Amino acid sequence: MHVQLLFVTPDAEALIARCARVSHRSASQGLEDDRRLIRKLLTLGHESVLEHAVATFEISGISRACANQLTRHRLASFVQESQRYVDVRDCALVRPPTFSDEDWAEAQALFEQAKNLYQRLLAQGVPKEDARFVLPLGIETRLVVTANFRELRHILRLRLDRSAQWEIREVARRMWRLLYVEAPSCFEDLKELAEEDG
Ligand SMILES: Cc1cc2nc3c(=O)[nH]c(=O)nc-3n(C[C@H](O)[C@H](O)[C@H](O)COP(=O)(O)OP(=O)(O)OC[C@H]3O[C@@H](n4cnc5c(N)ncnc54)[C@H](O)[C@@H]3O)c2cc1C
């Protein structure tokens, strides 16, 4: 799995605080002052100011099962590699940590069979969009996601939780780490969840 931050609003904390200060006509005394204001707003549940900053991630090497979960977040914007257009013969299968070596060897053998059938179907002139029906949910995919900080906090709160599946939880952890570096005051309250084991 690879999670890369493609873009984040520059000086996001300063921008968020600048926007928030419009409501009460205050002036910034610098970054620490901006951070104090953001922490206070989050405590009050005044999260709409976070919508003024956005981040874009490229996520690859995750299963289609994981992508299906991530793309349920309606306030985020996505582009996902299309199995209608891209030949996926080179794609790998994602290994769940619960699979034993024996399970994994069997899964990979099945996957090879599915890819052979996929290749044969393509050779017979079946379009990729139909040939893909024989491919498993564990096949890797790649997507780009953009969301504002408020929605990112929502996604992270749900997907860092123990009740989320291991794979999307790992995606969320990696997203959190990148965001925490960029704008600590906006994401530090999720630190405990992000660093929780198990
Ligand atoms: C642990 C876990 C298990 C899950 N299991 C299942 C499952 O078994 N089956 C299943 O189908 N899904 C499942 N989901 C997906 C879940 O139901 C949501 O679709 C997904 O988490 C997106 O969350 P959301 O709707 O809160 O967020 P987003 O779509 O990211 O929206 C953010 C927020 O905007 C607001 N919002 C967005 N759209 C609307 C709207 N139309 N009307 C009103 N308010 C809106 C809501 O406040 C929402 O919380 C699961 C999710 C988790 C985290």
Image: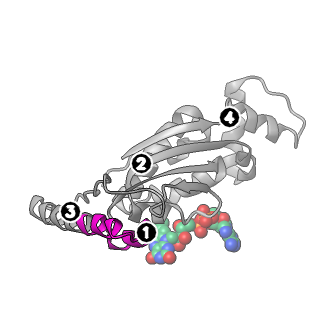
Magenta stretch: dominant secondary structure: helix
Of discs 2 and 3, which sits in the foreground? 3
Of discs 2 and 1, which sits in the foreground? 1
Q: Alpha carbon of mark 4 to alpha carbon of mark 1: how far?
A: 45 Å
Assess disc 4: are there few (<14), some (14-19) or many (≥20) residues with their C-alpha within 10 Å of its C-alpha: some
Q: Name the quadrant where ligand 1 sits.
A: bottom right
Amino acid on which disc 1 is placed: Pro
Say which mark, if any, is on residue 12: 4
Examine the structure image and report whether residue 52 is included in the region drawn in magenta.
Answer: no
Kindly state the secondary structure of the residue where label 3 is placed.
Answer: helix
Say which mark, if any, is on residue 127: 1
Assess disc 2: are there few (<14), some (14-19) or many (≥20) residues with their C-alpha within 10 Å of its C-alpha: some
Q: Where residue 114 sits in the image (x, y, percent)?
A: 25, 68
Q: Alpha carbon of mark 3 to alpha carbon of mark 4: how far?
A: 46 Å
Assess disc 3: are there few (<14), some (14-19) or many (≥20) residues with their C-alpha within 10 Å of its C-alpha: some
Of discs 4 and 2, which sits in the foreground? 2
- Pick the front one: 4 or 159: 4
Amino acid on which disc 2 is placed: Ser
Considering every residue shown, the one lying at the far front of the view is 124
Of discs 3 and 4, which sits in the foreground? 3
Amino acid on which disc 4 is placed: Ala
Q: Where residue 74 sits in the image (x, y, percent)?
A: 62, 64
Kindly state the secondary structure of the residue where label 1 is placed.
Answer: loop
- Magenta-tinted stretch: 116-137
Q: Alpha carbon of mark 2 to alpha carbon of mark 3: how far?
A: 21 Å
| Tag 3 residue | 112
Count of residue discs: 4
Residue in the image at 77% along x and 23% along y:
29
Say which mark, if any, is on residue 60: 2
Residue in the image at 84% along x and 28% along y:
27
Residue in the image at 58% along x and 57% along y:
154
